[in-house]
Image (cartoon, rainbow, N blue to C red):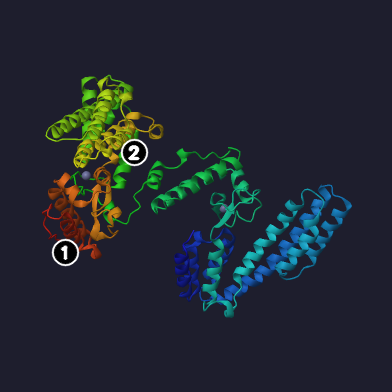
Amino acid sequence: MLSSQSLNELVRKAENIHNLSEYAKFLTKNQDYFHSKFKMYIYYVNRIAQNEPDKPISEVHKIQRSGTSKLMARVLNSQADYLAELLKKEVFSDADKEKILNCSQYLKSVSGIPKAAVLKEELLKTLGSLESDKRWEIYTNVKHNIQNIYTYHIALQYNPDKSEGLSEQGYIVKNMLSYSQNKLTKVYTNIETDKRFNNMLICRDCSPKYSAFRYIANSPEGAGRVKQYADDISYAIAENKLIGNNSYLYEFMGAVNSVTKGKIKLSRNNIISEAQDKVFKEMKSDYIFEDYEGIPCACCGVETLTHKQKLNLFKEINRCENLHELNNLSNLYSKHLTAKGALIQKRFNRLLQTNPEIKEEDVMLSLQYLSKQDIKHEMQNIKKEIFEFSKKRKYNNFDKELLNDFIYKIDNKYSRMKPSELFRYDEYDELVSDTLNRMTSPYKKTLIKISKRNIKELYLKDALVSPPPLVVEKTGSQAKAMIQNIFKLSVLTVDHINPKSNGGKDDYANKVGYCKDCNNAKSGMVFPAWVALRPEININLPRHLKKIAEIIKKERIKDMQSYPETAARTSMRLARGKLNIPEKYDTIG
Ligand SMILES: [Zn+2]
Ligand SMILES: [Zn+2]
C-alpha cells in the first residue's frame, strides 16, 4: 500500500522518463505496487523494450490497446462457451434455459469493446434474473472475467483533456497505481453496519469477489493473513500513538471470530504485547526527550527508562523462569529503580536470600505484609505527631471530639494488624474528611497535612506489591507483574512545572521530564510547595537539564537549543526563591 504522497512521487518519476528501456526498468523496479492484473502490461513493455529499445512509449501503448480489444473478444467468446457448457451439464427451467442462451448469443455477437453499462444491463436482464439458486454465482463468474479486461482497457485510456496535465505514461501509471491501492471491505456482509470494526483493508484482487472476507477466510493462507493484518494494524496504532483506536482492533477480532465461527481465532495474545502496551499508555505527548536514554529524573534523579527500554525489560522479565532469575534481572537494572521500587526490590532480594526455596505465593504475602506494616508504622507516627502538636494547643469540645474520633479509628483498626483489615486509601481519605477536615480550629490545616504527608506514597507502594488480576494474568505470575510495576515507575514522562490544573501552559517552557513515580506524587501540587517537599530538585533539575543539553548538542536538535535555559528560568521564577540552579546550559557544539 502506497501513501498518496509516494504514489504521486512515482507518477512524477514516470513523467520524467522518455525512453522505453528506462520505462521498462522503472515498471519492473516498482512492480510490487501494481496489482497482479497489470503484470501482463509490465511484461509486454519489457519484451518490446528488449527488441526495440528506441520505440516511442506511446507506440507501445497503441499496440497494447489494440491487444486489449482482441483479448476482450476472446474472453467474451470463452464466457459464451462457459454458458453453453453449463446448459449441457446442469438442469434449468425452460425460462432459465432461454435466458442463458440469449446471454450466450449476446456475448458472441458483441464486437470490439462494448460499453460497460450496456454489458452489465444485459447480464442482469438475463443471468441476474434466473430462477435458479445459482443465478448470482453464474452472473459473478461471467462478469468477473470480463471485468478484468475492462480494468485493463480503462487503465490504458488516455484523454489529454482529462489528464490534469499528465503525459500519457504518467497518466497510465497513475491509473494503474490508484487501482492497485487497497480498498475497504466488510467483515459482516449480512448486517448493515458502518461501524469501524466491520471494515478491513484488502487488495482489489480479493475485493470484487462476493463476500470478500469469507473468501479470504476460507482460502488456505487466509487465517494467517488475517492474523498478520491484525498484527500490522496493532503496530500501526501503537507506533503512531493512535490512542483510542485499540478498540477497533478488539471489535474487529470479535467480528472475525464470529463470522468465521471461530475458524480464525484472534485472541489478545495475537496482539504483540509491545504494541498493546504502547496503545494503552497514557503518554500521548509531544515531549521529544522521551525517546532518549539515560536522562535523570528532574526531581529524584533516578536514571529514567525510555518506553522502548521498558518494553525490552518487560520481555526479559517475561522470559525469567524462576524467582531467582527475576531477582537477578531486577538487580541488574537496579540503577533505574525509584526509591519506592528500590525498597520493594531490596525486600524481594532479601526474602530470596534468606530462604532460597520460598514459594512465589509466600514471597508476595510477605511483601504485602511488610508494606501494610509500613502503613501501620506511619499511622503510629501520625498519631504521635498529632499528640505532640496538640499538647501546646487548645481545641474546643467539638474539635476535641473529632480529633479523638480520628485517633480512635486509627488505633482500633491497627491494634490487631492483619493486612486485610487495613483501610484502603480512599477510606482513609474519607476518615480524614469526616474528622480532621470538619474541625473549626485554625490548626486544622496543619493536622491534615500531618495526616496525609507520607501516607499516600505508602499506599501507592502497597499497590505495587498487589498487582491487579488482569496484569497478573498477562504475565502469568504475581512476582513478574510486581517487578514490571516497579520498573514502570521509572519511565520518563513529561511534567508541567506549573501544573495544567493551575493554569500552566502545555509548551516546552513549562515542561521537564520526571520519572512516572515523581510525576504521580507531584500531580497538581504547585511548584513552590513541591520544591519545599523535595529539596533534591536543586541538585537533580540541573543534572536533568545538562543531560538534555548534551542530547540537543549531539543530535543537533536545532529548534530546541534554547530549551534547557528556558526551562531553568521558568522553574526559578515559579519556585519563588525556593530553588537555586544555574541558568546556562551549553547546547551548541
Ligand atoms: Zn488480496
Ligand atoms: Zn523521579
Residue at the outermost right position: 94
For label 1, the residue is 588
Mark 1, other Cα within 10 Å: few <14 / some 14–19 / many ≥20:
some
Residue 532 seen in the figure = yes
Q: For the residues labelled 2 and 1, say whether their Cβ atoms are less than 8 Å apart.
A: no
Q: For residue 219, what is the image quadrant?
A: top right
Using a 10 Å C-alpha cutoff, classify the residue at mark 2 as few (fewer than 14 neighbours), some (14 to 19) or many (20 or more).
some
Q: Is residue 443 left or right of residue 422?
A: left
* Ligand 2: quadrant of the figure: top left
387 to 254, vertically: above or below: above
Q: Please say whether residue 228 is visible from this viewpoint.
A: no
Relative to residue 11, is residue 92 drawn left or right?
right
Q: Residue furthest bottom?
A: 161
Q: Position of residue 17 (x, y in %)?
A: 47, 74
Residue 205, given in percent of the width and then of the height, sits at 59, 56
Task: Identify residue type, mark 1.
Answer: Ile
Instruction: Indicate the quadrant where residue 175 lies.
Output: bottom right
Q: Is mark 2 within 8 Å of ligand 2?
A: no
- Answer above or below: position of 165 versus 316: below
Residue position for label 2: 315
Q: Residue at x 54, y 73 (%)?
A: 171
Tell me the amino acid under the disc marked 2: Lys
Q: Does label 2 or label 1 sit earlier along the sequence?
A: 2
Specify the label residue 297 is tagged with.
none
Q: Looking at the image, is 403 positioned above or below residue 260?
A: above
- Of residues 157 and 88, the one drawn nearer to the viewer in this rendering: 157
Element on which disc 2 rests: helix
- Dot 1 lies on which element? loop
- Front-most of residues 505 and 555: 505
Residue at 50% x, 66% y: name it.
27
